[in-house]
Amino acid sequence: MSEMTDITAPTPAVGDGGPDMVQLLTPEGQRVANAAAADYAHYVEDLTDEDMRGLYRDLVLIRRVDTEATALQRQGELGIWASLLGQEAAQVGSGRAMKKQDYAFPTYREHGVAWCRGVDPLNLLGLFRGVNHGGWDPNEKNFHLYTIVIGAQTLHATGYAMGIQRDGAVGTGDQDRDAAVIAYFGDGATSQGDVSESFVFAAVNNAPIVFFCQNNQWAISEPNDRQTRIPLYQRARGFGFPGVRVDGNDVLAVYAVTKHALEEARSGQGPFLVEAWTYRMGSHTTSDDPTKYRVSAPLLPGYGRSEGEEGLRDMLDVTLHALDVMEKLKLKKPIIVGHSMGGMIAAEMAAIAHTEIGKLCLLAPAGLWLDDHPIADIFAKLPYELPPLLFHDAEAGRRILTAGGGDMGDIEFLKQFLVMNARRLGMAGKLLFPIPDRGLAGRLYRITAKTLIVWGKKDLLIPPVYGDAFKKAISKSKVVRIAKAGHAVGQEKPARNKNGIPRAADTSCTVSGSLNRPASTKPASRSHWLSTIMCKSSCIGPFSMVVVLPLNCPHLTPSM
Ligand SMILES: Cc1ncc(C[n+]2csc(CCOP(=O)(O)OP(=O)(O)O)c2C)c(N)n1
Ligand SMILES: [Mg+2]
């Protein structure tokens, strides 16, 4: 294969899969190998340029098939379609890692694996048109029929693997005979008893099976954090077999890890769990509307790996940009949640486009200035000064701020922080520096959305008295004060995950779970709404805003 560039992949942030995730390509497609990839990189060494082009061809073609099938559903030719959008690499990488004699058990979304097994895409459509139960011969393709019952196929696959074992087609050393089974399932399926039962059976019987979980981070409207407290690949350990997380958007890494896992299974080493970390870019199926439950957590241009901040000169530019993005995402009357500077932007959005915003939640927003209660200049602070300023519990705050790795006493950490701070000053400084007042006070009267104002009682950055000023100026507003919380109130007091420190730490987290009640319906109660918002805001970084998504942040596009 082509020469590998001699660089090491940056360790993925927690929200991007974490440090244990195997990667051989950057999101931009540059060939790299991170530390976790050490055991797998050699599996792609023999791939020729032609092989590479073949993988690319598979990716493109299967996406095209998917687009066509979605269009057919929209034309009324199919009853429903489950799109694979965003999961092409996970499916092509694993599908191409199989040998002819291996046998796959899919869910209903594995069109890319079907393609690799030689199933004519046309034959996939019958099931979705309602004219057959699956249009191919499973035993001809070694590709079982689609299974709609979540998780059930993992049991069938385990039984099949035990059958192969009993047929003596495992661990003989005959490369053309030894076979393995691969069972596909989703992150949501891991909550099914069937999946746990198949793990137990496969483990104690040492069955030749690769459990291939495509973690697209959603089970219809239920996000990952409603399925598990630990990364899914770690589950395997409890059952007694290895588990690896691979970048599911990296076709080479998926190919390498799956090849390894299948080899282990074929040679008699027993089961293996591969968690392909990916993202469901589209809806669950064509019957689903994800705008009803997905939360978009934008990063302001200038933050993280985004770009385009030079185009935003002042508060008006920023606000119109956020409204443009909201429009582009076709969000109708969304709930806008913003923290600190994000709260300031959210309030401006609700003031300017007051008929377009469903509800508003301001978590310790900036934007006002009271001479008797000055707000500290956050850009002048060094990292170690931030935990006591932003959190009621400074030690817990320090852990939150450094959970992505990092030591505040380390000079490298300081250097990185200063560079980031300078960049933030370039963008956020336009709104906050030297005094975070850009005339919002005179515009708040225009806000007609019901507004919840949340303040940590121990906020040392923007004192709680500002909550009263916001309440006074916004007609349909209420203030809720949260005990034992500082300025980072959403992170310090996430409602659902009481000890959500690792999750909360990733300030570039793109999508943060679902609102239990869709934005367009009434929340069950104010406390329900509050707890939902607090939970969601704990997943996004400070100063971010929920609901709209800047289109010019390339690393955020998967969340669309
Ligand atoms: C036993 C069972 N319960 C519920 C359903 C309804 N259902 C269909 S898809 C789905 C979510 C599956 O999520 P996941 O396993 O993450 O797979 P994904 O759709 O994301 O690929 C559910 C609950 C079902 N088909 N079978
Ligand atoms: Mg899923």
Image: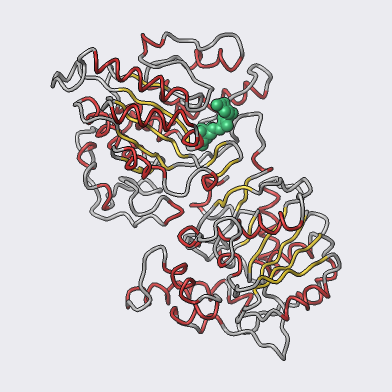
**Residue name at image x 73 percent, y 51 percent:** 334
Q: Position of residue 76 (x, y in %)?
A: 68, 19
Name which quarter of the figure residue 19 lies in.
bottom left
Image-based side of 377 in relation to 9, left or right: right
Name which quarter of the figure residue 444 lies in.
bottom right
Q: Nearer the viewer, residue 431 or 375?
A: 375
* Above-or-below relation of 303 to 330: below
Q: Is residue 85 visible?
A: no
Image-based side of 138 in relation to 316, left or right: left
Image-based side of 491 in relation to 145, left or right: right
Name of the residue lying farthest toward the left: 173
Name which quarter of the figure residue 383 lies in.
bottom left
Q: Position of residue 410 (x, y in %)?
A: 32, 76
**Residue name at image x 45 percent, y 73 percent:** 398
Q: Position of residue 72 (x, y in %)?
A: 62, 21
* Above-or-below relation of 257 to 534: above
**Residue name at image x 51 percent, y 84 percent:** 380
Q: Is residue 555 visible?
A: yes
* Above-or-below relation of 72 to 188: above
